[in-house]
Amino acid sequence: MNRFRQARNWEPLIFELGSKGRIGFLVPEPEDVAKKRVGSIDIPPEMKRTRDPELPELSEVEVIRHFTNLSQAAYGVDNGPVPLGSCTMKYNPRIAWEIAGDPRIVNLHPLQDERTVQGLLEILYELQKWLANITGMDTCILHPAAGAHGELAGVLTIRRYHEVKNQLDKKTDIIIPDSAHGTNPASAAMAGFRVIEVPSAEDGNIDMDALKSVVGESTAGLMITNPSTLGLFEEHILEIAELLHKHDAILYYDGANLNGIMGYARPGDMGFDIAHLNIHKTFGAPHGGGGPGAGPICIKDRVVDSEKNIVLSDLAPGYRVVYDESTGLYRVRGPGEYSAGLLKAFFGNITPLIWGYVYILSMGPQGLRRVTEHAVLITNYFMKLMENVKGYNIPYGRGRFRKHEVVLSAQPMADEVGVTAEDVAKGLLDAGFYAPTIYFPLIVKEALMTEFTETETPENVEKYAERLKEISKIAYSNPSEPKTWPRNTSVGRVDVLKANHPKHVTPTWRVHVRRMRGKFSEI
Ligand SMILES: *Cc1c(COP(=O)(O)O)cnc(C)c1O
């Protein structure tokens, strides 16, 4: 059965269910006591509401049914493959859930005295150390809440570096390859830098001539994802590091793709100064709806000012956990005098961090290497299955093995019969598969960016490839058919342009209701 079909045609919203005055569970009010305690309070009239709050009023069973139905309308990695390239949608092992949900962790308060949360601090301290080990860096900070947040922490650190060295006025540029994730230029711009884009060469590496022509006096840093979003390892990385350091610029590692090299290569050994990791990608914590993320940054203790004894990690934002030998206690430290400050409250998003801790602990060093081996193997198996399939090609890095992901292009099909990557994606949904990331990276036309991760079975990957072949056959025999897809999902094809334009979509439940009732027919 098509899992996307399980959703009854538009699940009603909770606001549309129930009935006025209906309640779930009510504890009888201890009348006199409550009244005595509360007494009478004079609330200023301007602070009083003028109408009742618009809250749903449902019985308990209605609430349970509503959320159970919604859970069945969703598709996730617990239902089947989610080969969203770059997102590393691996299975989230339940043992971590069990431990992260332990009341001894869940019930802690972030303002509790350090001496009463030694267990949690020890976990965070160990995680900092393990991540430093995995990345080949000196200091890790668990504070940032996601990968993009880690990037911001990283570029703010780069900014502080040049500020402390009194050279920020000339260090204005951050260089970013054209294969980068959109968050890289966004983070650099948010930190006040000018973004300089460098092209990728045909072999998938950075175009070194282009890079050399832009690196100079004004270069504050360079952000690279390695392996890149094409799934290819940057072969010139040592040369790039040397070039950057010669110009006193900082090399930043976007660690979202670490799953392709973990246990085999470390950004610290490649010459990187700062790296972020996505615990919710590489280390098995759930993404998005599964909870908040965690994007720790790991930093080399590169000397910034030898007289004042400042190293690069002193400039990073956020708290870190340290071990005090003299008292035998773990303590929370920072942000110090030279730090870029705080990006959020407290130490980090504890739940995904625990998830990552349990993941690393349960895998062990050998297990983490095996993860990489399997992720790489399954990617190259899929690439092999898709080689020479009519309608698709695999641009960049011809003849090179991929790491964690491979980017197919539906450009031949689009050119020859007008069937696009979007149509292919809908054709996958129609058959009950989840679509890959499409139209990214931007340098690949009609991109289908596919990443199965080590937890996917070869059987599922084969079925997926079969469906892609079938779509190609249909495209060439009856090119108008793919334009009618998807037909088996609870929502038909939306106009992607309108759906993405704020003028056409106001994402509130009221619009959703209007759309359900057919009054919003344009989309
Ligand atoms: C996912 C991703 C990011 C951003 O990470 P978030 O945790 O989603 O904020 C950055 N770069 C790359 C290459 C990514 O895949």
Image (spheres, grey):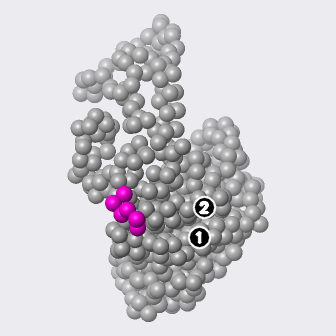
Q: Measuring 28% from the left and 58% from the top, which residue is drawn there?
A: 497
- Judge whether residue 501 is colored magenta: no
What range is drawn magenta here? 476-481
Can you give x and y, in whole percent of width and height, for residue 188 in the image? 40, 71
Element type at marker 1? helix
Q: Which one is nearer the viewer's eye here, 50 or 293?
A: 293
Q: Amino acid at mark 1?
A: Leu
Location of residue 187 (image quadrant)? bottom left
Height in image: 51 above or below 294?
above
Q: Which one is nearer the viewer's eye here, 111 or 58?
A: 58
Q: Measuring 46% from the left and 65% from the top, which residue is drawn there?
A: 473
Do residues under tags 1 and 2 come within 8 Å of each other at their CB atoms?
Answer: yes
Looking at the rendered structure, which numbered label has been put on residue 461? 2
Disc 2: residue Cβ within 8 A of ligand 1's nearest atom: no
Can you give x and y, in whole percent of width and height, for residue 334 in the image? 56, 60
Q: Amino acid at mark 2?
A: Val
Q: Is residue 186 visible?
A: no
Can you give x and y, in whole percent of width and height, for residue 313 in the image? 56, 70
